[in-house]
C-alpha cells in the first residue's frame, strides 16, 4: 500500500451529568474530528505514505455511512474480544475482522488502503475516560492493521497536543510504507 484514504474520524466528546447520563458536546466533537484526521494524516505521511482525505459530502454517501456504521460494530467486537473484558483467545491469536469490499471506493479515490478511526471522551474538561481506535482496511475489506489506545490521565481530545499524542500512541506499531 502506498496511498491511504483517510475518512473523517467519528469522535464523540460527552459531558457526564450528575444523574450519570451523557450530554454530547457537538462543537468539541467536531473540532476533535478535524484535529484527529490531521493527526492521522501526519502520522501516515511521517511513514512515507501518500494520503487522500475527503470532504463532508463524500462522508454522507450511503456506502460510506454503511461502512462507518459497520466499523462501529466491528470495532466494539474487536475491543471486547481482543483487548477485553471478554477476550476470545482465538480472536487474539488469529485477528480476523472484515467490513466487506471497499475496492470501488479506493479506486475512485486513487487509494489502495482505507483508514477509519473512532474515538470517545467522557467529561470534557477533566477526562474520566477516553480512547481512540484506528484501522486500516485493504480493498477486499479485511482489517489488516488495528491500533487502540486510551489514557484519560495523559490525553485530552480537546487539545491538539492531546490528540497528536493519543494518535501517535495508537499508531506506535504501524508499519512504514514499503515494509
Image (cartoon, rainbow, N blue to C red):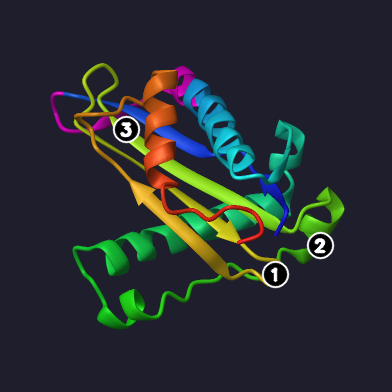
Viewer-nearest residue: 175 or 82: 175
Q: Which residues are magenta?
A: 18-29
Residue at 76% across, 35% down: 57
Image quarter hosting the N terminus: bottom right
Residue underneath mark 3: 121
x, y percent for residue 104 = 81, 62
> Residue 54's image quarter?
top right
Tell me the distance, in whole angstroms, between the alpha carbons under discs 2 and 1: 8 Å
Image quarter hosting the C terminus: bottom right
Residue underneath mark 2: 104
Label 2 or label 3, whichever comes before in sequence order = 2
Q: Secondary structure at mark 2?
A: helix
Disc 1 + disc 3, Cβ < 8 Å: no
x, y percent for residue 121 = 32, 33
Residue at 68% across, 46% down: 49
Q: Secondary structure at mark 1?
A: loop
Disc 2 + disc 3, Cβ < 8 Å: no
Q: Secondary structure at mark 3?
A: strand
| Vertical comparison of 44 with 126: above or below | below
Label 1 or label 3, whichever comes before in sequence order = 1
Which residue lies most toward the front here?
Answer: 179
Tell me the distance, in whole angstroms, between the alpha carbons under discs 1 and 3: 30 Å
Tell me the distance, in whole angstroms, between the alpha carbons under discs 2 and 3: 33 Å
> Residue 25's image quarter?
top left
Residue underneath mark 1: 101
> Residue 101's image quarter?
bottom right
Disc 2 + disc 1, Cβ < 8 Å: yes
Amino acid at each position: 500500500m502506498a496511498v491511504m484514504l483517510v475518512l473523517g474520524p467519528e469522535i464523540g466528546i460527552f459531558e457526564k451529568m450528575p444523574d450519570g447520563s451523557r450530554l454530547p458536546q457537538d462543537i468539541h466533537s467536531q473540532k476533535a474530528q478535524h484535529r484527529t484526521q490531521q493527526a492521522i494524516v501526519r502520522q501516515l505521511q511521517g511513514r512515507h505514505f501518500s494520503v487522500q482525505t475527503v470532504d463532508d459530502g463524500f462522508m454522507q454517501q450511503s456506502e460510506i455511512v454503511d461502512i462507518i456504521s459497520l466499523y462501529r460494530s466491528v470495532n466494539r467486537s474487536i475491543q471486547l474480544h481482543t483487548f477485553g473484558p471478554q477476550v476470545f483467545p482465538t480472536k487474539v491469536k488469529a485477528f480476523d475482522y472484515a467490513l466487506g469490499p471497499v475496492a470501488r471506493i479506493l479506486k475512485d479515490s486513487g487509494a489502495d488502503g482505507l483508514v477509519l478511526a473512532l474515538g470517545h471522551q467522557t467529561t470534557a474538561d477533566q477526562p474520566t475516560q477516553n480512547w481512540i481506535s484506528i484501522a486500516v482496511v485493504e480493498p477486499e475489506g479485511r482489517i489488516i492493521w488495528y491500533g487502540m489506545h486510551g489514557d484519560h490521565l495523559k490525553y485530552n481530545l480537546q487539545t491538539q497536543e492531546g490528540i497528536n499524542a493519543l494518535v501517535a500512541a495508537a499508531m506506535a506499531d504501524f508499519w512504514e510504507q514499503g515494509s
